[in-house]
Every structure is written in structure tokens, then in C-alpha cells.
Image: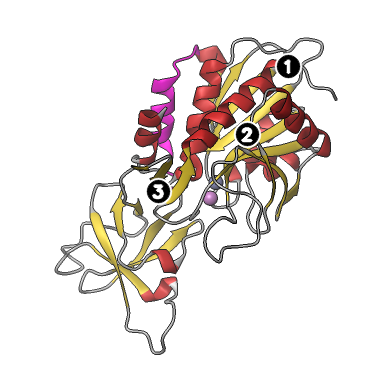
Amino acid sequence: MKSLVKNLVETAAPSGFEKPIRDLILAEIGVSSTDQQIDALGNLIIRKGTRTPTGKRIMLAAHMDEIGVMASFIDEKGFIRFTNLGGVFPVHCVGSRVKFLNGVEGVIGMDKLDKPGLPTLSQLFIDVGAASRAACPIKIGDAAVFERPFAVLGEQWVAKSLDDRIGVAILIETFKQLKETPHEVYFVFSVQEEVGTRGATTAAYGIDPDLGLSVDVTRTGDTPKGIMMEVALGKGPAIKVRDSGMISDPQLVQALSAIAEKSSIPYQLEVLEAGTTDARAIQLARSGVPSGCVSIPCRYVHSPSEMVNEKDVYNTVNLLVKFLSESLPF
Ligand code: CO
Ligand code: ZN
């Protein structure tokens, strides 16, 4: 799985420009055209299993997009001002490198600040080494992502865009390992999550599922002077109870926890105070869908060096495969 993850995180695909990841997934899991669909927004939807009398129609979602930036203004000297695609924090920007989708690389610099402290995004610019606006190889609307290679630090994997390429890799692996299921399972690789769970919104409407589950990263409370949060790296997948956009269906939380315990898979319960996932969009689709989320604990979310634990990754696959192999108690 490690080389798949490396491929996924080293591919550039910010919100709205997810095609390279979609192509990678299709190359990884070739399925018949009747079981797969790319909808109007670009969500990749792959179906597996036929619903038995005790089964449900289940939508799983992991988002293909990553946070990024977009050129909004270019001055006469060729310096590029930019806007954000999703949650880009200035604290991670200065000195970072970005790569535009046309291959051009740039460095983020900042204006001289009037008083000490953090710059705002509008006080930052991208320097692509151009001598003038006329010589600048970037045009307005061009998108870029942070540039950082995949690294292995002991048991931890570090990369940009582990949010949510790690979820994409887990869904691919779950698809491959799932042999028998009483359910009709829709593996949805969604677009535009980072700009407001837009892809999952339309995918959930189209699929009309009985149950929704997103697979995404969550924050942790295990770093020095970090946030007050129970979730830690290496203690297993986190079953979401609540985040700032959703309260998970209690029966689903209970069913996931019971399966983890029965299968001796370590797990944690998650309460996240800021942030949400595609599960919110699924939950609010049509007349409402019982939904939840299995989270991969991740340090430094939305920085160019996000960190997950490899055992957590494998345990998340194990939990999902077990969960989908059985009928639900509700
Ligand atoms: Co995110
Ligand atoms: Zn995410």
C-alpha cells in the first residue's frame, strides 16, 4: 500500500482539478463499465455487491481533492497574488514551494509586515522566477498545490495531501479485499470536499443510499501543547461521534465499535471541535441518511507535511472490510 500512497500524494490535484487522481484510481481498480460511473461534477463512483434482503445500500466516500492555491493577480514584476482552494493557513505558506498544474514551480514570499505576527494570505505572493508580468508563465485562474515528497519516519508516513489521499488509498484497498458482502456498496471518490463537500452532495443525491460513511483524516491531541482531543496516532482508526458539521448516527457508531471489538481491531472514539467531512453532505442528502465517519488520525492537517501512522492505515482497511462483510444489526 505504501507505494500506492506515495503515488497518490505526489500527484497534484487541488479542488476542481481531480482528474489525475481519478485516472490513478481507475488504473488501480479496473472494473467493468456497468459498475462504474463518473458523474457531471467528476465524482468517480464504483459499485460492488448486490443487495440481499438483509443488506443496505451503503455509500463510502473519500475525497480526491487536496487544498491548494489559485493565481488571482499578477503584478508588473511577475509576482503572483493568490487565493486559497480550501483551508490554506498562512503559517504554513511562507518559504513553502508550490507547483502549478502546468509544471511551473514557485516559492511563497511575503510583504514586509507593519507589526510582528502572522501575515494574511493577501500579504503573500508566489515568485516563479519570472522577470516581468509578460514573462510570467502563469495566467489568472491557474491552480497550484504544495510541493513536498512522501517520507517515511519510522512507523509514520509524512506527505502533503494525506488529507485525503490516505482515505482514497484505504478505499481502493478495501475495494480489493472485500470479497463477500450482503450490501450494495458504492465506493465514491469525491471532488471538491475541501471547498465545502460539494462532490459528496451531488453523489449522495444520485446514489440515494440507506447509510453513509466517509473515510477521512482527523486531528489529534498528541503533540506538545496541542489541542484537547483524545485521538492519537497509532491507537487505531477513530470512529467519529461528532465534528463541527455532524453528529454521527449513534447506531452506526455502536455497530462500528462492536465490529472493532469483536475483531480485536484497536479503535478510538473521536470528537472533533473544528472541521467536518463528506459524511455531513451525505447525512443531509434528500430526506436524510444515517451517516458516520471512520477517521485516520493525522498530525499537522492542512500543512504540507501531514503525518499518519501506518498501522492505523492497515487497521482502518481491516475495520471497513469487516464492517462491509456483515449484515448490520439495525
Ligand atoms: Co481537509
Ligand atoms: Zn479531508
Q: CA distance from mark 3 to mark 2?
A: 26 Å
Identity, as a three-letter code, of the amino acid under mark 2: Ala
Residue 93, percent from left and from top: 37, 65
Q: How dense is the environment of label 3, judged by Cα within 10 Å: few (below 14), some, or many (20 and up)?
A: many
Task: Judge from the rendering whether residue 50 lies leftward or rightward of residue 161; answer left or right.
Answer: right
Which residue is found at the position 26% from the left and 47% from the top?
102
Circle on res. 326:
1
Q: CA distance from mark 3 to mark 1?
A: 35 Å
**Mark nearer the viewer, 3 or 2:** 3
Work out whether mark 3 precedes mark 1 in sequence or the reverse, and give the earlier one. Answer: 3
Residues shaded magenta: 14-32
Circle on res. 203:
2
Residue indicated by mark 3: 160
Question: Is 157 in front, or is 160?
Answer: 157
> Residue at the bottom extreme?
114
Identity, as a three-letter code, of the amino acid under mark 3: Lys
Residue 60, percent from left and from top: 63, 30
86 shown above or below 327: below
Please say if the residues under marks 3 and 1 sit with CB atoms less than 8 Å apart. no
